[in-house]
Image: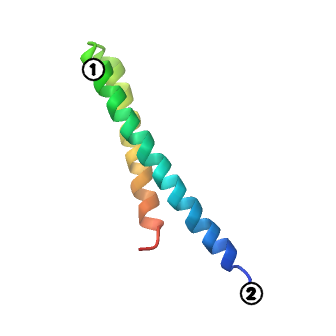
Amino acid sequence: MIEGVDTVHDGETFRKKRYKQLLREEIFLVGLAEVIKSNGDFEGARQVWARVWQTREARKLLRVRMPS
């Protein structure tokens, strides 16, 4: 067995799982922001949207490091 191969595979597995987790979080947050906005709490919705953008940027950065 080649040393270090498992480490590379584990890193890829981690990135894929983290990417999926961030995507689920982003989808949830978008829905939450819409519900909060529909209830008239625009400041609360703005705060959730800020978190959506942070999550989206983190996911994009992770995607860049994932092998095609």
Residue type indicated by callout 2:
Met
Q: Which mark is residue 22?
A: none
Between 16 and 40, which is closer to the camera in this rendering? 16
User: In the rendering, at what x and y percent does residue 50 appear?
Assistant: 37, 34
Q: In the rendered view, would you say 47 is above or below 55?
A: above
Label whose residue precedes the other's in the sequence (1 or 2): 2
Q: Which mark is residue 1?
A: 2
Give the image location of residue 1, x and y in percent: 74, 87
Residue positioned 51% across, 60% down in the render: 16
How crowded is the residue under tag 1: few (<14 C-alpha within 10 Å), some, or many (20+)? some
- Provide the secondary structure element on which disc 1 rests: helix
Residue mark closest to the camera, 1 vs 2: 2
On screen, 64 above or below 25?
A: below
Residue drawn at x 42%, y 65% as measured from the top left:
64
**Mark 2 secondary-structure assignment:** loop
> Which residue is painted at 39% across and 49% down in the image?
57
Image position of 54 (left or right of 40):
right
Q: Amino acid at mark 1?
A: Lys
Residue at the extreme bottom of the image, as rendered: 2
Q: Residues within 10 Å of mark 2 (few under 14, many from 20)?
A: few
Residue 48 coordinates in the image, percent (x, y): 38, 28
**Could you tell me residue 35's position as x and y percent?**
31, 22
Q: Which residue does the numbered mark 1 point to in the structure image?
A: 37
Structural distance between the alpha carbons of marks 1 and 2:
55 Å
